[in-house]
Amino acid sequence: MPFVTVNGAAIHYAGGRLWEAARGPAAVFLHGAGGTHEQWRFQMRQVEARWNALAVDLPGHGDSQGDGCRTVADYRDFVRDLLNALGVPRAVLVGHSMGGGIAQSFALAHPDRLAALVLVGTGARLRVHPDVFAAIRRNVGEAARLISGWAYSQEALPATVAQGAQAFARNRAAVLEGDFRACDACDLMHEIAAIRLPTLVLCGEEDRLTPVKYARFLQEQIPGAALIVVPGAGHMVMVEKPVEFNRALIAFLETNLGPTTS
């Protein structure tokens, strides 16, 4: 998979196509705290076959160099620099959890660079339970099990939850804590009404980390936003219910990126 240099660091992303102007803006997938591009594997299979698309490992995550960022605004500026480095003039940002906060912040700061927004399992305010920080300080593996246990629905397979915990446990403690500190400080509740972009809000009905009420607030505050609540899914809705998730995502992209151009 390819790398691109951003601010002196090698940044890893999935999505091997060269950018084609005829294929329109790029769909850019942003993972949440402690995540990687792998969280979008079920979406990338479909989206990159039809449009320009990439799923990035944010700095310090997955195979990307760096130490992570300490604020959502810093991650927002990284995304701007990433798009510049790749020569992507406009994008649809698809952001999950912390990635959704980054997408909202980007939409407020650089609306001319976006064609649309997809906000997944996220909120305008992203408070973090104190137990998360306490667990990270004790042991990353313990924190990973705690977070993964909260991130999936009650119906999720134990193996799925265990795989999620293993992925979280690969993070360095400083990066993981930095992500959750960035989330905890993120509060865009009084700003998001200024967003004037086509917006789709997606949330799992059983999301315990960013409950449905967070999604409803986004839908109510962002003019014209649409909300889809996916039954039987938790915070990791795109992993737990990829068929239902992709159906909604593809329909939204067809409306805002145009028909497929293989």
Image (cartoon, helix red, strand yellow):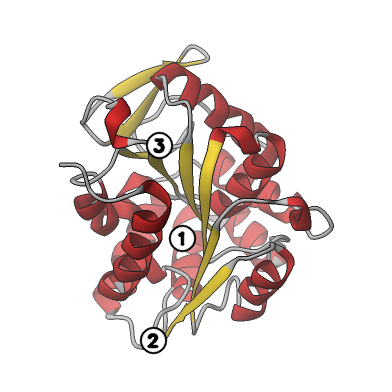
Residue 242: percent from left, percent from top: 28, 69
Mark 1 element type: helix
Instruction: Name the residue carrying label 2.
Output: 232
Q: Quadrant of the N terminus?
A: top left
Q: What residue is shown at x 40% (from left), y 36% (from top)?
A: 25
Q: State whether residue 161 appears in this view.
A: no
- As displayed, is residue 226 above or below residue 178? below
Q: Nearer the viewer, residue 233 or 45?
A: 45
Instruction: Name the residue carrying label 3.
Output: 25
Q: What residue is shown at x 30% (from left), y 66% (from top)?
A: 246
Mark sitting earlier along the chain (1/2): 1
Res. 144 mark = 1
From the viewer's perspective, is the residue at label 3 or at label 1 nearer?
3
Tags 3 and 1 touching, CB below 8 Å: no
- For residue 179, side relative to residue 205 (left or right): right
Q: What residue is shown at x 30% (from left), y 70% (from top)?
A: 247
Tags 1 and 2 touching, CB below 8 Å: no
Q: Nearer the viewer, residue 252 or 39?
A: 252
Q: State whether residue 233 appears in this view.
A: yes
Picture quadrant of residue 14 = top left
Residue 259: percent from left, percent from top: 27, 51
The 10 Å Cα crowd at callout 3, few under 14, some 14 to 19, many 20 or more, is many
- As displayed, is residue 43 above or below residue 175? below
